[in-house]
Amino acid sequence: MSRGSGGGYDRHITIFSPEGRLFQVEYAFKAVKAAGITSIGVRGKDSVCVVTQKKVPDKLLDQTSVTHLFPITKFLGLLATGMTADARTLVQQARNEAAEFRFRYGYEMPVDVLSKWIADKSQVYTQHAYMRPLGVVAMVLGIDEEKGPQLYKCDPAGHFYGHKATSAGSKEQEAINFLEKKMKNDPAFTYKETVQTAISALQSVLQEDFKATEIEVGVVKADNPVFQVLSTEEIDEHLTAISERD
Amino acid sequence: MGDSQYSFSLTTFSPSGKLVQIEHALTAVGSGQTSLGIKAANGVVIATEKKLPSILVDETSVQKIQSDTKYWSCLQVFLSFHLLSRKLSYGMGPDFRVLVRKSRNQAEQYHRLYKEPIPVTQLVRETAAVMQEFTQSGGVRPFGVSLLVAGYDDNGPQLYQVDPSGSYFSWKASAMGKNVSNAKTFLEKRYTDDMELDDAVHTAILTLKEGFEGQISGKNIEIGIIGTDKKFRVLTPAEIDDYLAEVE
């Protein structure tokens, strides 16, 4: 079994290529893009908001079952961009881990601890050949007791960073360019500004105006740190505010 | 370690006798951001570039220099490289976290058993053994990181570099990453055996500055020091800015 030079296997399992790359991890990133959905997250002064497209491919589908936004605990939310099936396993494991943490240590799992745990799990898949990396980028949001609103993004490579604003999915780079301009001077957005920045970023990048049923919005606010998914009416209010503003 | 579904090693000898996976891992390290370490007469300093993929990233959430016990530190090299027209920064940051966790465990176990802090050489040896295992066990790939370990124990200040192969050496000064050859030449010229820790920090900053793209500041480099007090700490951005001002 001559594996010495990679022998072509460097594309099939997570071993190094001659340039020091891990092709399987790179392909996992491509799988996230191939899902055709873009997501945005914005962190404000006292709130965090995540927005994603809600594409229901078939009219016969029950729309309420199509979602990428998952509560992990009452206080932590997770937006999964990419392969839906991989997202569901990740969410299942994260929910389990957060619940055990709460039981074991007596306080709620903080955002960065959960993100690190997700990222460490993803790292294992990049190093052990028997499991492929998950084709999911996870954005975790919550209000930290000490640090305030937090938004973390974890990717298939096992990387995780805290973000002031970020994006994932097919139009990730365009969205990041848009957000970099908006966040350049470290603005401290209020809750409404946070939500509207996130939604208008998505609209601008995809160049279409949404109906309330075509997007999903999740928020956490410092004065009420429970993770909430906005209802269609609430989304409509924000959409109207945005169109009146422009 | 290793997985029964893959009961053979993925790192095998090529016909010329090389372990190619390890060489590829070293290539991965070599494309990472520049890092360096300098052993002074009364301490050790390690420094690295901390270039983040976007201004949207919250830099306070990123720490490239981690301490294992109060007594020392590891430093890793990030692999960030350009894929087509975009920067795909994946990397060996995740691999680094695994090694930090294992080293911390080993340091704690030693302390529990012997009631004293683990000597630098011992910790380096054990961490290196872990890295070597991943070059030989079934179903796993080598780590894509080189570690710079700085410590101060009864044998004085020490600086070690551990490679993905699991081999390690003690250094007076060392560098790794993209700008390694320029950095090493610079260090060779500037290094003296009787250097003080402050001088070493200045030299470290100057070395990083050599190959730095853009404006160097306390926000895009990270520096850790350990002195005769045997307490390792990471400098705050403000302290780094002070050192930068002195250097200019």
Image (cartoon, coloured by chain):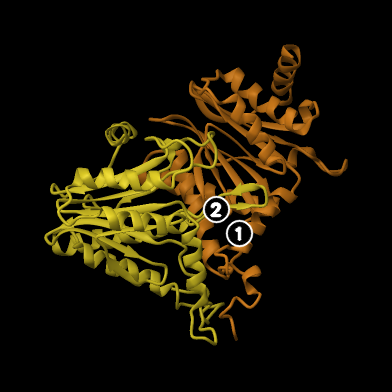
Chain colours: A orange, B yellow
Quarter in which the C terminus of chain A is drawn: top right
Q: How many marks?
A: 2
Quarter assignment of residue A26: bottom right
Q: Which mark is residue A25?
A: 1
Q: Position of residue A19 (x, y in %)?
A: 57, 65
Left or right, A15 with reference to A244? left
Q: Position of residue A211 (x, y in %)?
A: 80, 26
Q: Residues within 10 Å of mark 1 (few under 14, many from 20)?
A: many
Q: Reply above or below: B117 against A171.
A: below
Q: Reply above or below: B194 against B215.
A: below
Residue sitting at the far top: A244
Q: Position of residue A112 (x, y in %)?
A: 45, 41
Question: Which residue is depicted at the point 46% across and 48% down?
Answer: A116
Q: Position of residue B166 (x, y in %)?
A: 37, 71
Q: Which mark is residue B127?
A: none
Q: Which mark is residue B90?
A: 2
Quarter in which the N terminus of chain A is drawn: bottom right
Res B228 visible: yes
Judged from the image, the secondary structure of the residue bearing numbered disc 2 is: loop
Q: Residues within 10 Å of mark 2 (few under 14, many from 20)?
A: many
Residue type at mark 2 is Tyr
